[in-house]
């Protein structure tokens, strides 16, 4: 049987070469339809969703306990472990192949199991157990450091020694398309003597990728590189919405709290680690060399092209404001996970790890408006002359990501959010 | 029917006046026995646990959907809301009253439903959805500030305007009695040029109380004082174990992470907010006056006597090293909850809010070894001449708390943890 990543594979379903969802991808999500509002697990293929619960009931997928795909999240499936993930993906690939008649020639089953993408509502693909947000782009950390502490002290002394991170708020991780209300909070501009409680005036996005952890690790343990890697089920796009003015006043000394707790948006399709395998590459050189517990022997970065587009309130279409790549990350997801567990912290199925804002070395590769507008001093100009330093009510932010293969691409779809005014 | 807080109530079960669990308390927990290993909900009364699942099956408790008390956490019961909480507590009080024959005179049911405390194993009483840790004792924040920044800049400028807090790690909240392995992590003492990965050398406890949130609040909303208060199901004792040396190196700029993620211990019995009602009092004066969204019209503090005892490795008995009171907290739990939701952060059933380390105004009222030993410069002397600046392997830390009534006390039991060596 050919490997599901084989670039020569074709599906009996027509897939446009520009589609994010060729047979080499097969990302998992949770969907429902008007006809069947039960939230269940599906896989994206071209312009269709393959209903895994239909296939499971029809005994076409044997993953163990019946009902894994009738769950409203991937958590039960992820809990089954990497061998089941690989076996299931291989089987789904087989069922969708143009040279495999089983589903191709079974019209009755096809009609039940293949749902046009236009008919589905996509839901949160994972029940988020814990949400951790890292800060692992050296370019981003440097940009922020230069802005707030000057060029000579841009990176904090600990930054080159560990993937700095903090616990985020899992309760407000939402799926793409969820509208985001402008938060209110305590603001104290430098000119004010005392803070006031008011709507955020410096609302920002952060372009990140999220790791979906699919296996648990016990309290008190540590992880090897291989263990950490095998716990990673897949990746999503992640927008870590940020209220810069709330953050500035609240974050000393315990870190960001409400400035990051009002919403975090993720894309609905989890692209599996296995599907990204052909796009694995070596990350930036790490100097000083990581301490032993953070050493990795394999290249642990991935080349994922990333695009951020802003549709200003009233505009017809989004305009690209940043183009960068996941490959620039200094600390890899595997190193983040090894660090996370290194002190004995238990990891759970459904943990979500944000990579940290992904900025590249060039000016047009910055992953937040804070950096793009250089703290508001260089507003970005959009088509029609509209300018933005930070997000305004009615603005929509769209992030897209994809790995470019030869004649196909393994894509993430998009994560979109529109800003509603504060109440 | 008399109110379950009525101090004249007596149970047909003999309860020592020094017991934490008279009929005026009725705290909820999750337990199992050797004979019946199913984790289920019970209430502590004297030296017994009242098995609520037995009562529910026997149609003595009608809380709605059958099976609420056969769950391995209080979450399903808490989700039913404050009216059901009050009704259920009143009914349990009635069933336990000395002048009510229903359970008193039903030996068969008593034998099934009353389990000697010595026969039970206590489990985590709540499935923790999110764990947030605050920093709301002015005395604690001041002590830490004086130690690290000097007397003139002890309190950060934001501290008096909001309950400063951060997201903790829910996956390692454990029940009393769980052993705590000394964490390893990156340490960089001032004398070292580079960090090393090694066992924590400055392992500490933090005396806190935890609020168990029993009702959800939607994303994007805010809470009034009354709404916040009614969401609080009850309180536990909480030990926020802390690795001071790991914390010192990692916490800039995103706050504590692994230094607090290896373990947080809570007491097994949730004392309900209703049971604490007779011990409600006015907290310290707040100056400057809180912003409108943090204003409270009612006294929102509680008088809970707190004792911390340390049994040094090899010693026979714990020795008290701190005596303080929950009443000293500057920001109340209700203010913490109002602040938490104020930016639109969703709250969930099972959220746990740590109060922050509880220190009082006096030297012997400090809630951490960091403060008691003044950053290691004044080790505490224990019976037999043993000294401690921080915790050593084999040490046990025991926290107890109670509200002193007239002739009875509403107690929390204890939260205990023993330090295991790092691997």
Image (cartoon, coloured by chain):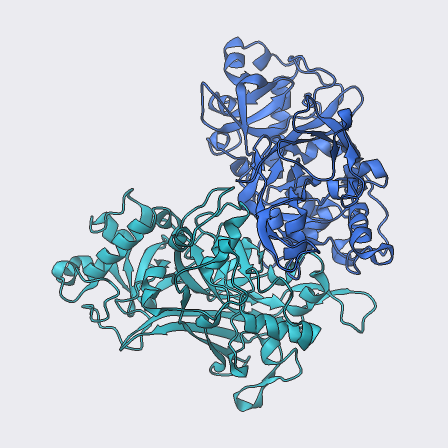
Chain colours: A blue, B cyan
Q: Nearer the viewer, residue B168 or A245?
A: A245
Q: Nearer the viewer, residue A289 or B121?
A: A289
Viewer-side residue, B419 vs A47: A47
Q: How many marks?
A: 0
The residue lying at 85 percent from left, 41 percent from top is A361
* Residue A303 visible in the displayed image: no
Q: Position of residue A394 (x, y in %)?
A: 62, 31
Q: Position of residue A138 (x, y in %)?
A: 80, 48
Q: Residue furthest bottom?
A: B384
Within the image, what quadrant is residue A153 found in? bottom right
The quarter of the rendered structure image containing the N terminus of chain A is: top right
Q: Is residue B90 above or below residue A371?
A: below
Left/right of residue B423 with respect to residue B339 in the rendered view: right
Residue A253 vs residue B402: left or right? right
Query: Measured along the vertical axis of the image, is residue B257 above or below residue B139?
Result: above
Q: Where is residue B385 shown, x and y percent of the image?
A: 57, 90
Measured along the vertical axis of the image, is residue A84 above or below residue B57?
above
């Amino acid at each position: 049987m050919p490997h599901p990543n084989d670039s020569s594979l074709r599906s009996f379903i027509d897939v446009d070469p520009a589609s994010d969802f060729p047979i080499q991808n097969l990302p998992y999500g949770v969907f429902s339809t008007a006809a069947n509002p039960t939230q269940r697990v599906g896989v994206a293929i071209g312009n269709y969703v393959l209903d895994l619960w239909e296939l499971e009931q029809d005994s076409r997928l044997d993953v163990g306990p019946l009902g894994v795909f009738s769950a409203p999240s991937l958590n039960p499936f992820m809990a089954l472990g990497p061998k089941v993930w690989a076996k299931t993906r291989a089987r789904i690939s087989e069922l969708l192949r143009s040279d495999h008649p089983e589903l191709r020639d079974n019209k009755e089953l096809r009609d039940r199991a293949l749902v046009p993408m236009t008919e589905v509502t996509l839901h949160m693909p994972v029940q988020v157990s814990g949400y951790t947000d890292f800060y692992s782009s050296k370019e981003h950390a440097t940009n922020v450091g230069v802005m707030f502490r000057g060029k000579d002290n841009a990176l904090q002394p600990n930054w080159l020694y560990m993937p700095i991170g903090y616990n985020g708020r899992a309760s407000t991780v939402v799926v793409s398309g969820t509208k985001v209300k402008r938060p209110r909070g305590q603001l104290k501009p430098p000119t004010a003597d005392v803070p006031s409680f008011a709507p955020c005036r410096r609302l920002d996005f952060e372009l990140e990728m999220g790791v979906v952890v699919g296996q648990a690790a016990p309290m008190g343990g540590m992880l090897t590189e291989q263990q950490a890697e095998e716990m990673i089920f897949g990746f999503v796009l992640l927008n870590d919405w940020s209220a810069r003015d709330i953050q500035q006043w609240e974050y000393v000394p315990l870190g960001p709290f409400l400035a990051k707790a009002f919403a975090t948006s993720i894309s609905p399709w989890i692209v599996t680690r296995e599907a990204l395998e052909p796009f694995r590459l070596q990350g930036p050189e790490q100097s000083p060399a990581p301490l032993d517990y953070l050493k990795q022997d394999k290249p642990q970065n991935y080349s994922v092209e990333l695009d951020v587009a802003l549709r200003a309130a009233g505009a017809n279409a989004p305009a690209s404001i940043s183009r960068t790549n996941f490959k620039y990350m200094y600390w890899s997801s595997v190193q983040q996970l090894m660090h996370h567990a290194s002190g004995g912290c238990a990891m759970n199925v459904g943990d979500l790890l944000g990579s940290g804002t992904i900025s590249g070395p060039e000016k047009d590769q910055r992953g937040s408006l804070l950096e793009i507008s250089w703290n508001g001093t260089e507003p970005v100009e959009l088509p029609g002359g509209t300018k933005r330093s930070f997000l305004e009510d009615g603005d929509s932010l769209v992030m897209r990501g994809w790995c470019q293969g030869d004649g196909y691409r393994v894509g993430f779809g998009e994560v979109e959010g529109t800003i509603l005014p504060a109440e």
